[in-house]
Image (spheres, rainbow, N blue to C red):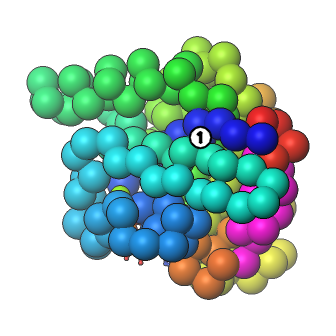
Amino acid sequence: KSGFVALVGRPNVGKSTLMNYLVGQKVAITSNKPQTTRNRISGIYTSNEMQVVFVDTPGIFKPHSKLDDYMDKASLSSLNDVDLVLFMVEPEEAGKGDQFIAEQLKNVKVPVFLVINKIDQVHPDQLLPIIDSYRKLGDFAEFLPISATQGNGVSDLLNAIHKYL
Ligand code: GDP
Ligand code: MG
């Protein structure tokens, strides 16, 4: 199997980190500063079962400037060219920025997975209320808790991607 998968989410949720983990090389720039990934960067994951091109998008967020607005449109229009979207969030209940992105994702026709990253920072009991807060915001095909730095949950994520491609 093969396909294209887009990574979307607020700045700093760990999109580039996940991409680097999957692709195994420093293809996307990670930093504590938001919006390092100005342009879309792709990386290819290959295994015996599948080949996936991951597209790391600049953050989709509420536009404050013409440049932001442009990046927004570029990000959004790319989302129907892929086979699957990973909406990545932090392990906390949905905030304003996440709600805004979830709203934009309602127009996307391909399946959207809700990927809760940085689970190494929370107790497992905290996950259920987080998942519930996102259930209200959209029709997500899968809910996948992961840690992009430690690798927890990443094989489940890859299995889910394989299932949908
Ligand atoms: P992006 O803006 O969404 O691309 O986010 P980055 O990949 O640049 O990551 C932002 C920050 O979060 C970096 O300091 C990462 O090291 C950190 N980070 C990413 N994934 C994880 C994770 O699973 N656990 C923890 N504790 N930190 C993470
Ligand atoms: Mg990034």
Residue at 80%, 78% (x, y): give it: 124
Overall secondary structure of the magenta stretch? helix
Determine whether, in the image, residue 112 is placed left or right of residue 25: right
Residue 109 image-quadrant placement = top right
Residue 8: % across, % down: 49, 43
Q: Which residues are magenta?
A: 152-161
Determine whether, in the image, residue 62 is placed left or right of residue 69: right
Q: Quadrant of the C terminus?
A: top right
Dot 1 alpha-carbon crowd within 10 angstroms: few under 14, some 14 to 19, many 20 or more: many
Question: Observer-nearest residue: 111 or 27?
Answer: 27
Residue at 52%, 53% (x, y): give it: 44
Magenta stretch containing residue 39, yes or no?
no
Residue identifier under label 1: 5
Residue 42: % across, % down: 42, 48
Residue at 21%, 32% (x, y): give it: 68
Residue 150: % across, % down: 62, 84
Question: Observer-nearest residue: 48 or 121?
Answer: 48
